Amino acid sequence: MDVLDEKQNGAPPMEIDELVSVRDHEAFAAKHMPDLGHDMKDFKVFSWRLTNWKKLDKKLTSPEFECGGHKWRILLFPFGNSNAPPNDTVSVYLDYAEPKKAPEGWHACAQFALVISNPHDPTIYTVSHANHRFIAEECDWGFTRFSELRKLFNVQEGNMRPTIEDETADITVYVRVLEDPTGVLWHNFVNYDSKKETGFVGLKNQGATCYMNSLLQSLFCTRFFRKAVYQIPTEDDLPTESVALALQRVFYLLQTSDQPVGTTELTKSFGWKSLDSFLQHDVQEFNRVLQDKLESKMKGTQAEGAIAKLFVGKMKSYIKCVNVEYESSRIEEFNDIQLNVKGMKNLYDSFKDYVAVEMLDGENKYQAEGFGLQDAKKGIIFESFPPVLHLQLKRFEYDIQRDAMVKINDRHEFPFEIDLDEFLDAGADRSQPWIYKLHGVLVHSGDLHGGHYFALIKPDRETRWLKFDDDRVTPVTDKEVLEENYGGEALNGMPPTLQRNQVRAMKRFTNAYMLVYIRESAIDDVLAPFTVDDTPAHLKRRIDEELLQVEAKKREREEQHLFLTAKVITDETFTQHEGFDLATFDEKNWPPSDLPSFRVLKQENYSTFKSRVAHHFNYPENQIRLWVLVNRQNKTVRPDTHIPENEPALTVEVIRNNMAARQNDLRLYLDVITDPSKPDPPPQSIMIFLKHFDTSKQSLYGVGRVYMAKASKVGDLVPVINERMRWTHSTPLKLYEEIKPGMIELMKPKLTFGQSEIQDGDVICFQVDLPDKEIHDLESQGLYSNPVQYYDFLQNRVMIIFKPKFEDPDPDAEFSLILSKKQNYDIMAVKAGEYLRHDPIKLRFTTTNPTTGQPKMVLKRSLNQSISEIMSPSYANPTTTVILYEKLDVSIVELETKRSLKVTWTGIHNKEEGTHAFLLPKTSMIHDLADHLSKLVTLSTGGTGKIRIFEISKDGKTQKEFTGSEMIGNIPEPVDLYAEEVPREELEADDSDKVIGVFHFSKELQRTHGVPFKFVVKRGEKFADTKKRLQARIGVSDKDLVKYRFALIQVSTFKQPSYIEDEDTIYEHQFAPEDVLGLDHVDKSGKPRSGVGEKALTIR
């Protein structure tokens, strides 16, 4: 370990320093060994005097000494360790003596200082200090470049004598062995086993999902919750589609696995694509959405109501008059409580702040029904707390000065135990004390724009506190649970040298943002031990089977090098093959042929392998022979020679290496012997493969093999073929040799096979010789009249997959077409149109990115590109190209000059009445669009007749109105347009009125729904009257209006709605441009619509 040479005596520059003697142990340690904040187990100082320095050995060890139950010694290289330049430095280390005799798995955490000092004046010395976890693999630690020798031998500035005087010096080591209550102090976590050390395993982080991991671990450790999740029936579910099953599986694996558990299956079941996992949502939102989802799955099962029983409490908002008997209140349920951190010293203060009473008096008196204006108290009080209490600490807030969200890193303390009795209503049930014990701390480290999350959890009364940090679980001390997560400045009491240390400064950004407390009287129920029966048998069965499969696959992979794959071409596979050679192996744009395959031990004897093949195809062994296929120089793959039968030592690997030019797999042709009494092919014969090009079917398929004498003529094949095809023997044929792709040649019937250079494994293609008229008819229909043309098509054919651009429930919506790269856009459109039964001119195609599958660019019909241009450039070499299609109502020719728009009409009462589609020239203005719309919608009688067209802001809270003169071609895609009738009240508003924005939300501000609208606020009007005008504006019944709550949403307070009472006059609020009125009511539309800016978190 290299440490920079420290100044003489270790003193900072320009400071008058007290001289300290190496022999004054306490003072020396206080000065040179900072307190690291850990308890000390033992402290020893050991000194060792050396003389005749220049004659010392290259490496020396001191006598041993004992400290903290371990034996130590000094390890010295008087002229430097071998890695340092020789003879000019001193290297010195603290060495753990006899590590081999220590018990297995030993470790010792030691802080130490090594000193070389003058034997006569112990205030002259050079010192360096360090700390280390000593283990078998790292049993010495110290300083390779402790000091330059010349500095030790020469008198240094400010001293009277050198450190090494008369070749003599004292070497001293100060050792503090520290307590390691968690067993992982300064651990490097190489080969660390979470399960072995803690009994728990972590979760793998798949991107920015550690907030999810910390919450899942907290929920997993809430055993009552885990049992409830296990009670959801999921036997017939698929894990990637069922959130309940995927969560059960994660929990089961956390219970049983020795390795960190993955969550990809779970996020897939949420319907999250990988991108969503990286959008760091906040944990409260994730928790709520997950619990909503599970709650609906628990309905009608044993687990019904479990979530409410565990996590739901009740609070009462009230206004109570001081001088008369009158109270107005409402009781609401909560799943978690959001507490202020800013300005609060600790959790108790945050609770006091939450229930703080506001006095309504003076000008702010309360209008009590039947009592007029009264002094009153307004506040919140709790009716009950749930057994498991989730407290969200508001670490993220809106800062009005910066106009941005900021993270609050202020110090905020929380205890291991808190009594919440005083925050409960007088009438609450106090049969059991309301004492809560800390069970979990969810921590965020970093700033607003990211950072890292982990959880600290105490799984039950007996188990110690553990830190769940993604895939690692480690024990922690109480101080790591509380003090280190309060936030605020770096830890107090730290020596200034260490406060300058980067790691300590970072601490300020690491603090708790969610606390989990469990009611003491409920702990035994909530954290009841887990029994075998609590885990569903089907889950165990299913996962055990999967693990066996994984093990088998792993074994297969590990043994892969011992095996090879043999692929066998048969006459049957040949008859189904349409392409070059006898089968397709490595073609770029075409999938390989599906051939019978055998996994064979490389050392297996050929005779054993052959009998397996014979058995598989139901032939006697003496009726088959196997030919080896080779890669010819012209890039074709053909049978070359048959495997000799009479070599007992022949193994499958030898065959591959010697006969098949080292392909990865062995490719074979199964040749069936018709007469077993003649096992060898006829002498001087050639094995030829035949293919038939059928012009009527436009197909080219194999029809088996024949043996022909080398000296016979090519024309002699004609009667053989006619007999095989059961054609009349005089049927005229044309024969072509398939030499290689792009080289298909007509054969001369009068030449012999030898003269035509035909050899074993060659392919001859035949077709019936057609009269010229038939040839002409075929070609005029765009069909192929001979194999040369058809082989050209095969060489250029590609399979293109067509998928609908927007989701389509029809299972036939996805299809594939086989096209030639030489064909063009028009042919593709016609063929796709034929399949879809849709006019090709009304189909619009979009290419996709080969790696992500995302839409790339719309294909322009006017370019009429070839298929190869449409496909290129395919650097990724995919075997298939995916093209997206849309069925349009208009021709794409028209679409290239026009813009297609949809407008949702909300009328006069802010109700989505319908959607209207328009196709207008791109040069049309928004006011033209309004004119077209006015002809399709019904405007109110006696209304203004004016239409406003607008978009909705990203957060879903306000309208973004158009002026009317924008050109529709310039509106960025994609766009959701809305239109409403402008109410008379708004049109006639005068200067004293305020026009404000109003939007709909459900419980939480980010859960927006409906369409925002504009509304006039009048001077001096009490909210009770404003509400009546609002009711008329949105057209809701009295019965429904009772369920609405109204809130002022101020940009400055962000996320915190202040609910409005009937007596309030909202006109008096100083509206900032973005301040809006929120209508809090249940969304009955069933349509998800949330702010686009923060993509709403959904679990499907």
Image (cartoon, grey):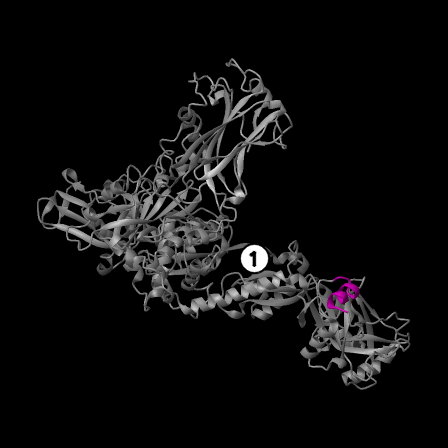
Magenta extent: 650-662
Q: Nearer the viewer, residue 166 or 257?
A: 166
Q: At label 1, which amino acid type do we have?
A: Gly
Q: Is residue 491 above or below residue 1022?
A: above
Q: Does residue 735 appear in this view?
A: yes
Any magenta on residue 606?
no
Residue 306 in the image, given as x and y percentages of width and height: 30, 62
Which quarter of the rendered picture does the N terminus lie within? top right
The residue shown at (42%, 54%) is: 199
The residue wearing badge 1 is 853
Mark 1 residue element: loop
Q: Nearer the viewer, residue 237 or 870?
A: 237
Answer left or right for 423 relative to 1009.
left
Q: Nearer the viewer, residue 86 or 240?
A: 86
The picture places residue 662, in percent across and down from the top left corner, at 75, 61
- The residue shown at (49%, 19%) is 124
Question: Compared with residue 674, is residue 1092 higher up or lower down, i.e. above or below?
Answer: above
Q: Report if residue 768 is visible in the image.
A: no
Out of 765 and 632, give the one closest to the viewer. Answer: 632
